[in-house]
Amino acid sequence: MFWLTRLKVRTILTHEDGQPVQLDALLKGNAPFSLPVKVGGKQTLAAYLVAAPLGEDDLKKRQAHLKETARKKQRPTSEQQLAVSHWTLYLTNIPGLSFEQTHILARTRWQIEMLFKLWKSHSHLETSRSKNPDRRACEGYAKLLAVVVTHWLLLVGGWECLAVSSVDALNLIRRYVPQLLQKLALRQPFIKVIERLKVMLHRLPRHSTRKSNPLAFQLWQQFDYTFP
């Protein structure tokens, strides 16, 4: 299983030969780098340290954030935190990633949370009008099954429509549920309904593109064009 996370200041890092990684020495340069490391003390985990220096504007924002955090917690920022603050540092076990690709992946991780939010808000997974625990459990499983089928319909009908709002796509799929149920009840193939759904998904309005703060689908397009 692949993973990606930001480097925490107190994380123990060693080289492949077991020698400790000297971050102070590594962060004296001004160019991005990727370094194979071992993470942890007794039980180590193989990973890559992927890093790049911050620009002046981003550095000012980060230092302001550190200052505000120190004020709220009423304790000074450590020297190591100040040194590391000049860089963006990631740990990952995904081989062959450039810093640009790693940074894009990190910026789009919140899409997972957005998917869960969509399921909770629009599929009402956490709500029920019944107080009977068995009925609530049955209703919950039924809603989860509906979410799986809905996601499957979106994959086969409009996966390439990255610029379409997920809420708009969900609402459109809901309108086609009666037709799909009718086809299933009559034991007829519903490929025509899916084809029609695909056409309608392509007709939905698209998100506008943004240069200063790109949307998720724009970031993924950038990922495809960046290489180590």
Image (tube, grey):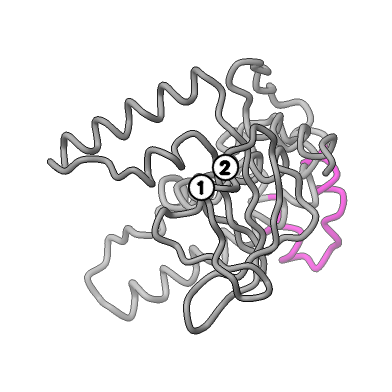
Magenta range is 179-198
| Quadrant in which the C terminus appears | top right
Secondary structure under the numbered disc 1 in the rendered image: helix
For the view shown, which residue lies furthest in the bottom direction?
A: 42
Q: Main secondary structure of the magenta part?
A: helix
Is 22 rendered above or below residue 55?
A: below
| Quadrant in which the N terminus appears | bottom right
Side of 65 where 27 appears, left or right: right
What residue is shown with label 1? 24
Residue 187 falls in image quadrant: bottom right
Q: CA distance from mark 1 to mark 2?
A: 5 Å
Tell me whether circle 1 and circle 2 mark residues in contact (CB < 8 Å).
Answer: yes
Give, as a three-letter code, the residue at label 1: Asp
Residue 64 falls in image quadrant: top left
Residue 119 magenta-drawn?
Answer: no
Residue sitting at x 33%, y 81%:
134
Q: Which mark is residue 6?
A: none
Is 187 rendered above or below residue 167?
A: below
Side of 117 where 189 appears, left or right: right
> Of residues 38 and 111, which is closer to you in this image?
38
Secondary structure under the numbered disc 2 in the rendered image: loop
Residue sitting at x 16%, y 43%:
75
Give, as a three-letter code, the residue at label 2: Leu
Residue sitting at x 57%, y 42%:
27
Residue 217, position in %: x, y? 70, 34
Q: Residues within 10 Å of mark 1 (few under 14, many from 20)?
A: few
Q: Which mark is residue 27?
A: 2
Residue 83, position in %: x, y? 43, 40
